[in-house]
Image: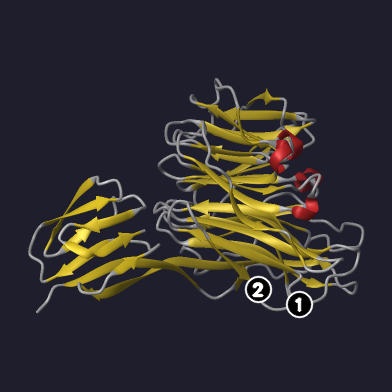
């Protein structure tokens, strides 16, 4: 029997469960924010006007909460977290989940938390800090320290609490803050803030010591090149930062685009932005315009991005179907490349996506679904929260080639090279410069995961070229 060559590679796909409707009340449910705890519990907050569904109070005024303690299979009842007579609760909110506790800030500053996975909530402090805005992001470090960020009047403010939210230290940390800021904390107690937007560009601000001192900020993208807005920020267990943002959304909103970049050195340098989506012109009146991106990451180099896309222009109501829908992009190589697909579910209007990812890799995808009003546009008073759970699934493929046929394995995701009826424990590869690589294995199975992209020749097999 002759020697056979197998190249084994693993393809990843996302398998989605059925769609779940999370809210079903009269009025509007909007602005979903989510997080996951260490056991895979999923926690969601949103703003809602179900208790005031009258014509004088159109926009959502309360914050509601619900959870799933079995990774999205079943869900608790809707729970209001803000008092009905507290008008400040409609000004915005931020949530984060750490271990088994959930932290929520609203207004200036209404801070509530739950230490038992959302079963019971405690109002820790209700204090007026003098701001009109609400925190745009909140994070918790491994010692329980709380950190939030907000922008007001062109100034970026940072706040921290080391006593569980009973007292807060707040100070300005930059003069380029607008109402588009995000904050995360790494495992070494470093605080990372991405802020700015529009003509100011996007900037990264870093504190190595829980917010006590700050490094000089560095620019991620320039304002005159991208006109960025609506950033979203995620961090993985290695400390890699992942950023998505909407570009060219201020002076050239009709050419809006979705961009992705990442930093593997704590925010000091960033990759060249990767274009995920851009505006598509369909006629002299209408264009498909992307916006409002969100990002989540897992522990296995998976990056997941969502954004909405709408048909706009000319003052003419968008024709059905699908004039507002959700786009989804995913990468299984740390964001080096993406696969992008639309989420279209019929003649609904889908907006404001939100993504969280569990430690085990479960993807939790939320969005707002609406219906058309009599004018043809979204009826803002009839919207609900919907949910999809997804998981990465693998399929192993084997390609078989005989040695007398020259073949190039081109642009593939490579994992293993298997040479049947080959009893040696190593093979030698050469790249185009002649550099030699020793690849070890057992029973003809050789691991290729450590190789960089390029073209390789196998010593002793002149008719075979590996290229990836």
Image mark count:
2
Percent x, y for residue 27? 79, 66
Name the secondary structure under disc 1.
loop
Q: Is residue 448 visible?
A: no
Q: Is residue 306 left or right of residue 101?
A: right
Residue 272 drawn above or below residue 149:
below
Depth check: give the residue in front, 153 or 168: 153
Depth check: give the residue in front, 266 or 36: 266
Name the secondary structure under disc 2.
loop
> Which quadrant: the C terminus?
bottom left
Residue lying at 71% horizontally and 49% vertically, measured from the top left: 82
Q: Which residue is mark 2?
A: 344
Residue 321 has which mark?
A: 1
Q: Is the C-beta separation of discs 2 and 1 under 8 Å? A: yes
Q: Is residue 213 visible?
A: yes
Q: Is residue 29 left or right of residue 212?
A: right
């Amino acid at each position: 029997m002759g020697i056979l060559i197998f190249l084994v590679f693993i393809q990843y796909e996302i398998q989605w469960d059925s769609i779940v409707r999370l809210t079903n009340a009269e009025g509007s449910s909007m602005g979903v924010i989510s997080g996951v705890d260490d056991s895979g519990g999923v926690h969601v907050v949103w703003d809602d006007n179900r208790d005031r569904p009258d014509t004088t109070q159109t926009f959502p005024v309360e914050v509601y909460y619900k959870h799933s303690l079995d990774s999205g299979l079943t869900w608790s009842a809707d729970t209001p977290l803000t008092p009905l007579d507290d008008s400040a609760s409609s000004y915005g909110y931020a949530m984060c989940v750490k271990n088994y506790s959930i932290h929520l800030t609203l207004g200036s500053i209404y801070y509530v938390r739950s230490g038992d996975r959302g079963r019971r909530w405690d109002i820790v402090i209700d204090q007026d800090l003098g701001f009109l805005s609400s925190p745009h992001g909140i994070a918790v470090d491994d010692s329980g320290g709380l950190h939030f960020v907000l922008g007001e009047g062109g100034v970026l403010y940072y706040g921290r609490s080391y006593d569980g939210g009973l007292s807060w230290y707040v100070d300005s940390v930059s003069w380029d803050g607008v109402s588009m800021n995000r904050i995360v904390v790494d495992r070494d107690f470093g605080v990372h803030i991405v802020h700015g937007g529009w003509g100011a560009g996007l900037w990264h601000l870093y504190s190595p010591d829980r917010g006590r001192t700050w490094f000089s900020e560095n620019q991620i993208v320039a304002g005159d090149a991208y006109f960025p807005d609506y950033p979203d920020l995620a961090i993985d267990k290695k400390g890699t930062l992942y950023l998505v943002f909407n570009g060219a959304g201020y002076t050239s909103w009709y050419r809006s685009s979705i961009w992705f970049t990442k930093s593997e050195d704590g925010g000091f340098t960033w990759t060249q932005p990767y274009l995920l989506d851009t505006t598509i012109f369909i006629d002299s009146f209408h264009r498909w315009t992307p916006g409002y991106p969100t990002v989540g990451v897992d522990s296995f180099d998976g990056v997941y991005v969502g954004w909405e896309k709408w048909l706009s222009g000319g003052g003419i109501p968008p024709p059905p179907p699908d004039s507002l829908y959700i786009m989804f992009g995913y990468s299984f190589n740390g964001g080096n490349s993406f696969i992008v697909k639309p989420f279209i579910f019929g003649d609904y209007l889908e907006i404001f996506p939100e993504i969280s990812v569990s430690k085990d890799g479960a993807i939790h995808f939320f969005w707002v679904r609406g219906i058309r009003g009599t004018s043809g546009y979204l009826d803002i008073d009839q919207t609900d929260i919907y949910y999809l759970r997804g998981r990465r699934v693998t399929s192993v493929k084997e390609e078989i080639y005989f040695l007398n046929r020259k073949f190039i394995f081109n642009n593939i995701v490579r994992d293993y090279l298997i040479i049947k009826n080959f009893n040696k424990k190593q093979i030698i590869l050469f790249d185009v410069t002649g550099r030699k690589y020793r690849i070890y294995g057992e029973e003809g199975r050789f691991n290729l995961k450590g190789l960089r992209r390029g073209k390789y020749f196998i010593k002793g097999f002149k008719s075979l070229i590996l290229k990836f």
